């Protein structure tokens, strides 16, 4: 097996929140399922609600779509949150807990370390969270086959649908990973310099965009930040993930990609030794 | 004393092979307001054990961290031809390291650590490590944070000795360990060392504890090299004379490096060139590394 496999396994053991939080969400989903499955009253309450609201034929389809979107949105949000939390602390944690010299004593290149950290943050975490979608769809499918009344409300007619929905969700998360990649490399770099990288990034992006407006009357930076920071959520919620990407200008994407490359090179340079400071960049 | 402080920085000579395992040339590391180490040079061949001695803050850990690629530095370092920073992954296939402070990840279990090391280190034998650990009280299921300091060192050593590397660096490895652990540690270390063509660097305060292991010595003081010799050269170049106090004025003329007053006699550390002249004045002994270490540290630079 390739060393990267063991490195990913190590990240999984080290950052337990990435498995525990989805597990907790799954447990909550399971409890909800059990209460729906075994409570006749709940089923009744469901149908009563829809009767009051009117036209059943369109509404049940709409409800099913909304339910699916809610699962997508909730799981995507958990995945994004976990990814950013992981990326903002993974390199710093090793230094803080004093184990960096042990990891440094392993025959692993700096580029491989970065590749694994980015892979874990942007691929492995969404993959774990995608299991949540699979789990939720499986529960809804069970609900679907168990009750004709509830079946009208759900979009999980077969196991094939459940599996294909899972793959579609993971594919969407991979587009988000691509969109997040430049931000992830910048986070890795900044996390080595400061203790609260997300806060620093948030405050500095605010400062930069408002300074640009106040000093030069230039709104380009504000627009750029808006486009870039809203892109992951747009990809997550858009009916077609690629349409969200195509709405962004090539110039903005180009600048964003360049910032990502800069962040990657900066992070590599900072992580080469334990002398982490801005001064070491020029040595 | 001046001869001692400015002794030549020649490469150690007692080698078993001509293959250079580690080469350090004019290495200097400065921090923002002070010198870490300055202009350090030495080479290590297979079979050599270099003792890196010095007080706290002398620069031992700075030099070691530079060897491991943990510091930016000026000068040249090569381990089997690899640069510590630019060829880090390749270099670490040949180099191992044990530190005084625990660097093992506390949140891992012993089993997980062995699995990880086996996965990423091509020359690590999990079977061998397990065999070594079976002779200790360390359980594979234990979390590293649950192990005592001595057990952590044993675990780290078990990993090192199960890895086929050529150069081992030890930074105060037995600090805080009881005598039993120390004895076991050095026994296992020597078994591993004699198991192949290897070289070692041992940094320690405990001069007397490591003296019998060393083939060469490099003594640091405030980042500077104050003595660099092979043990053979030290035995040839220095001696101790225990002489009655009435010979003191005569011995003073031989420019003693240090003196230690006793009851009616004084022990003097002298350079080897005066051995013949001093012989008739008292009892002559071979110099101990501790005496030489103290002499280099007490003398003002």
Image (cartoon, rainbow, N blue to C red):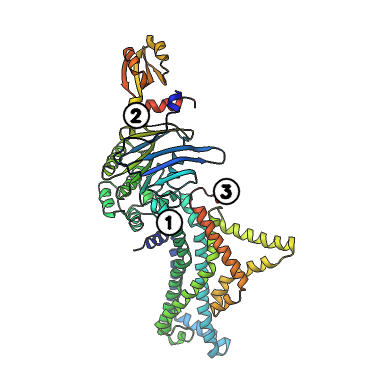
Report the chain holding disc 2: B
- Distance between the alpha carbons at the discs numbered 1 and 3: 23 Å
Closer to the camera, A46 or B99?
B99
Dot 2: few (<14), some (14–19), or many (≥20) neighbours within 10 Å? Answer: some
Q: Is residue B285 visible?
A: yes
Report the chain holding disc 1: A
Closer to the camera, B27 or B137?
B27
Closer to the camera, B250 or A158?
B250
Residue A123, position as x, y percentages in the image: 46, 68
Residue B182, position as x, y percentages in the image: 31, 38
Check residue A279 in the rendering and tell me which mark sits there, or answer none: 3
For residue A226, what is the image quadrant? bottom right
State the residue position of label 2. Answer: B233
Between marks 3 and 2 in the image, the one whose residue lies nearer the viewer:
2
Return the residue found at the far top.
B246
Determine whether the residue tagged by mark 1 lies in a helix, strand or loop. loop
Between marks 2 and 1 in the image, the one whose residue lies nearer the viewer:
2
Report the chain holding disc 3: A
Q: Is residue B190 left or right of residue A221?
A: left
Residue drawn at 48 percent across, 46 percent down: B71
Vertical position of residue B245 compared to residue B154: above or below? above
Vertical position of residue A217 compared to residue A97: above or below? below
């Amino acid at each position: 097996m390739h060393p990267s496999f063991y490195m990913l396994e190590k990240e999984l053991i080290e950052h337990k929140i990435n498995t525990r939080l989805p597990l907790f969400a799954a447990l909550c989903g399971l409890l909800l399922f059990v209460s729906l499955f075994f409570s006749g009253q709940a089923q009744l309450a469901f149908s009563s609600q829809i009767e009051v609201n009117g036209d059943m034929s369109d509404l049940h389809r709409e409800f099913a779509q909304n339910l699916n979107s809610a699962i997508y949105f909730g799981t995507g949000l958990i995945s994004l949150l976990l990814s950013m939390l992981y990326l903002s602390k993974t390199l710093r944690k090793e230094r803080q807990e004093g184990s960096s010299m042990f990891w440094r004593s392993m025959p692993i290149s700096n580029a491989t370390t970065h590749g694994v950290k980015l892979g874990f943050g942007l691929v492995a975490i969404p993959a774990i969270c995608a299991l949540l979608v699979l789990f939720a769809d499986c529960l809804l499918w069970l609900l679907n086959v168990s009750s004709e009344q509830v079946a009208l409300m759900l979009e999980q007619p077969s196991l094939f649908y459940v599996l294909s929905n899972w793959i579609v969700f993971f594919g969407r998360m991979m587009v988000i990973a691509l969109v997040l990649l430049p931000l992830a490399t910048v986070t890795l770099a900044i996390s080595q310099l400061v203790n609260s990288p997300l806060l620093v990034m948030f405050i500095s992006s605010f400062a930069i965009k408002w300074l640009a407006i106040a000093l030069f009357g230039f709104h380009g930076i504000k627009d750029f930040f808006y486009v870039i920071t809203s892109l992951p959520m747009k990809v997550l919620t858009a009916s077609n993930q690629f349409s969200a990407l195509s709405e962004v200008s090539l110039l903005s994407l180009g600048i964003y990609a360049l910032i990502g490359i800069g962040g990657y090179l900066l992070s590599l340079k900072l992580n080469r030794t334990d002398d982490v400071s801005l001064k070491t960049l020029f040595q | 004393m001046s001869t001692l402080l400015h002794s030549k920085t020649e490469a150690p000579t007692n080698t078993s092979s001509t293959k250079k395992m580690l080469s350090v040339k004019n290495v200097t590391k400065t921090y923002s307001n002070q010198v870490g180490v300055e202009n350090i040079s030495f080479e290590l061949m297979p079979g050599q054990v270099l003792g890196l001695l010095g007080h706290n803050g002398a620069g031992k850990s700075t030099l070691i961290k530079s060897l491991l690629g943990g510091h930016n530095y000026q000068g040249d370092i090569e381990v089997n031809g690899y640069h510590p920073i630019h060829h880090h992954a390749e270099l670490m296939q040949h180099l191992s390291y044990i530190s005084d402070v625990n660097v093992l990840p506390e949140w891992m279990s012993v089993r997980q650590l062995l699995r990880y090391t086996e996965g990423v280190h091509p020359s690590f034998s999990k079977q061998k490590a397990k065999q070594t650990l079976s002779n200790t009280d360390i359980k594979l299921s234990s979390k590293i944070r649950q192990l005592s300091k001595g057990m952590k060192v044993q675990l780290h050593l078990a990993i090192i000795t199960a890895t086929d590397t050529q150069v081992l660096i030890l930074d105060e490895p037995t600090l805080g360990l009881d005598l039993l652990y120390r004895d076991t540690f050095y026994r296992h270390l020597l078994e591993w060392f004699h198991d192949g063509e290897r070289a070692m660097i041992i940094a320690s305060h405990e001069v007397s504890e490591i003296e019998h292991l060393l083939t060469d010595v490099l003594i640091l003081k405030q980042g500077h090299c104050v003595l660099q010799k092979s043990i053979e050269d030290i035995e040839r170049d220095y001696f101790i004379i225990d002489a009655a106090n009435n010979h003191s004025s005569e011995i003073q003329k031989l420019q003693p490096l240090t003196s230690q007053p006793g009851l009616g006699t004084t022990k003097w550390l002298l350079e080897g060139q005066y051995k013949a002249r001093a012989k008739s004045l008292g009892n002559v002994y071979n110099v101990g590394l501790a005496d030489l270490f103290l002499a280099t540290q007490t003398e003002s630079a």
